[in-house]
Amino acid sequence: MPKLNGVIETALYVDDLARAVAFYEHALGLEILNRDTRFAAFDVGGRSVLLLFKRGATLETVHLPGGTIPPHDGHGPLHIALAIAADELAAWETRLAEQGIAIEGRTAWPRGGHSIYFRDPDDHLLELLTPGVWAIY
């Protein structure tokens, strides 16, 4: 069987793209790779891309010079986890507090990793997690 090498893109759907872009740029310090009226793409650690799509803006096939992208969309609060270094957990907690972002939960995992949970402006649950959460991380 051919093997998969990883997850490259993760998508969240947002009601107000400008508000969401501001949150991810300013609160989390992510850099925009590409943006138009229906989406924004962010570099996450130089290894993956976080896509924010304006909810309902991708319900039609997108035609590009190189091919097509089929319709997609999502509803409701979703969850993503972002990797952080163990020695930066406290700095992230401070950063979130300075941005007025409430931490909703904390977990110390049996393998030794730690997670903190908070919400973006569209009520998506974001998790920052340190190594030791999964057997592979």
Image (tube, rainbow, N blue to C red):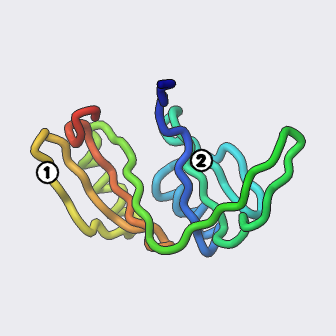
What amino acid does circle 1 point to? Ala
| Residue 32 image position (x, y, % from top left) | 64, 47
How many residues crowd around disc 1 within 10 Å: few (fewer than 14), some, or many (20 or more)?
A: some
- From the image, tell me which residue sits under label 2: 42
Identified at 58% across, 69% down, the residue is: 14
Q: Is residue 106 left or right of residue 41?
A: left
Q: Quadrant of residue 88?
A: top left
- From the image, tell me which residue sits under label 1: 108
Q: Foreground residue, 29 or 104?
A: 104
Which comes before the other along the chain, label 2 or label 1? Answer: 2
Q: Which element type, helix, strand or loop, lies under badge 2? A: strand
Residue lying at the far top in this picture: please name it: 2
Q: Foreground residue, 73 or 39?
A: 73
Q: In this view, does 93 lie above or below 5?
A: below
Q: In this view, does 135 lie above or below 76?
A: above
What amino acid does circle 2 point to? Phe
Q: Foreground residue, 78 or 129?
A: 78
| Residue 84 image position (x, y, % from top left) | 34, 41
Measured in 3D between alpha carbons, the distance from the residue under mark 2 to the one under mark 1, in whole angstroms, is: 28 Å
Residue lying at the far front in this picture: please name it: 1
Identified at 39% across, 68% down, the residue is: 119
